Amino acid sequence: MLDTSTLERESRACEFLWVDLMPDPDVSMLNAVLDAYEVCRVRELHHVSSAIRLHAPPFVCFEVDDPDTRVFDSLMRVRNDHPELPVLVITGRDSIVVATWAVRLKVWDLLVKPVRHEELNETLSSIASIRRERDTAVVSNALSASSSSSGSQPCNRPGPPKRTLAAISHLHAHFACRISLETVAAACRLSPSQFCRVFRKDHNVSFCQYLLCFRMNRARELLERENMLVKEVAYAVGFTDLSYFTRSFKRHFGVCPAAYQEGTRRYAAG
């Protein structure tokens, strides 16, 4: 399992970032989806940038009844600093000004209240699914490049970036153990904050996402090839929380690990 550090908070505490600018948090639409997602809630605009840096969320949702200049400026800052980050805006004001800003800032979607819970869930699921597919593809490509570097490799074929190679080596050797951000950063002779920036620049994903994808792929292999209980697989790839492992596996592959294992056994038997 990940150490209780920035690395763990990034992976476990934030499936997305919700900027709740409602005067009363009890009326926020976030309350309708809290049971389905692990959300980082921000109530102040000046906390948005630091929350994005800390949690690296897959996407951001702004909920505000009546957007003003401060909200638009914050949205613009997010889009400029993180152009790859999808942004959903939920507002209670239906006006040409808001629509124009949404188009200009290239937000993912604009929902105007009243919004049905079904519509909100469909929108969140759509954004999460597309981001998950993109991130999985990016991480899988990075993992393939890293794996190929351990064998024979032509001299003209680029290997993994040298600045973070020590972290990748540590991950491959110790993925079943507790891994802290400080440990892998020190292995690369970088501070934790420097390491986060360098790793994301080199691999296009955070180290935490890379590690989670590696563990999920290893878990899938064990479920396919080994006669192991699901909890044994979870522990073998570095999880001590079985429920978190099950949720992570289902989000990653679209099916819970027990069902996946049963399906592979039936296929092999048939």
Image (spheres, rainbow, N blue to C red):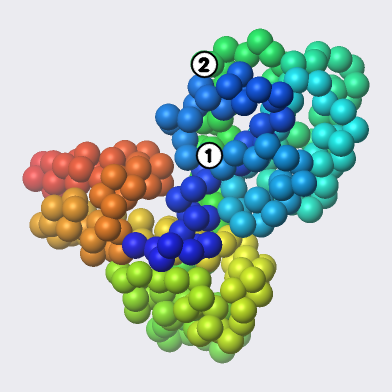
Rendered location of residue 37, percent (x, y): 47, 35
Find residue 63 and report its horizontal and vertical position in percent. Answer: 69, 27
The mark nearer the N terminus, 2 or 1, is 1
Relative to 242, say whether 105 is above or below: above
Amino acid found under the numbered disc labelled 2: Glu
Q: Where is 108 relative to 137, above or below? A: above
- Measuring from the top left, give residue 95's x and y in whole percent: 86, 15
| Distance CA(mark 2)–CA(mark 1) | 18 Å
* Few, some or many residues within 10 Å of mark 2 (<14, 14–19, 20+): few
For label 1, the crowd category at 10 Å Cα-Cα, with few meaning under 14, some 14 to 19 and many 20 or more, is some
Q: Secondary structure at mark 2?
A: helix
Observer-nearest of 99 and 220: 99
Quarter of the picture containing the C terminus is: top left
Q: Residue shown at 69%/20% (left/top)?
A: 111
Task: Name the secondary structure under disc 1.
Answer: strand
Residue 28 is left or right of residue 76, and the answer is: left
Residue at image location 64% in from the left, 71% down from the top: 193
Residue assigned mark 1: 39
Of 102 and 72, the residue lying toward us: 72
Q: Quadrant of residue 196?
A: bottom right
Instruction: Please name whichever residue, 195 or 153, is drawn nearer the observer in this view of the structure.
Output: 195
User: Tag on residue 169?
Assistant: none
User: Given the current orientation, which residue lies at the most extreme bottom position?
Assistant: 155
Q: Amino acid at mark 1?
A: Val
Residue topped by disc 2? 118
Q: Is residue 133 left or right of residue 52?
A: left
Q: Residue at x 31, y 64 (%)?
A: 238
Rendered location of residue 113, percent (x, y): 69, 13
